[in-house]
Amino acid sequence: MSFFSLLWLAALGLGIGALGRAVVKNGTPMATWMTTVVGVVGAVGGGGVIHAILGDGHLLIGTGLGVALAVLLVTAVTGWQRTRGQES
């Protein structure tokens, strides 16, 4: 995977993390930096999985899976943070 592909996926993850924070109703218990880090990890991880499976030349598919994984991770971590806060 090229450096620019990683940079593209990281930028998308950063945006997904920010959007995830904006979309969740009643705010999110996660810090802003944590939301963006989870988004970046999800996007780069999803893109890396597609690169490992399909090889070079599938940036569009990698981008789609990266975005989907970033959204799922932000949603899952936000839900986990909420339930953890309610147990106290």
Image: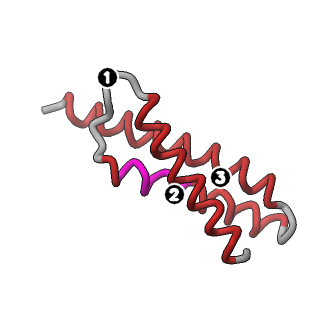
Residue at 69% x, 72% y is 4
- Disc 1 marks which amino acid? Asn
Q: Position of residue 35 (x, y in %)?
A: 39, 48
Rendering quarter of residue 83: top left
Please give left or right for residue 66 compared with residue 20 in the image. right
Residue at 54% x, 41% y is 72
Residue on which disc 2 sits: 40
Camera-nearest residue between 13 and 86:
13
Q: Residues within 10 Å of mark 2 (few under 14, many from 20)?
A: many
Stretch in magenta? 34-42
**Quarter containing the N terminus:** bottom right
Residue on which disc 3 sits: 66
* Secondary structure category for the residue under label 3: helix
* Secondary structure category for the residue under label 2: helix
Q: Please count the marks in the image.
A: 3
User: Are the two marked residues, 3 and 2, in contact with CB atoms closer than 8 angstroms?
Assistant: no
Residue at 67% x, 77% y is 3
Q: Position of residue 81 (x, y in %)?
A: 30, 39
Rendering quarter of residue 48: bottom right
**Image disc number at residue 17:** none
Q: Residues within 10 Å of mark 1 (few under 14, many from 20)?
A: few
Earlier in the chain: of badge 2 and badge 1, it is: 1
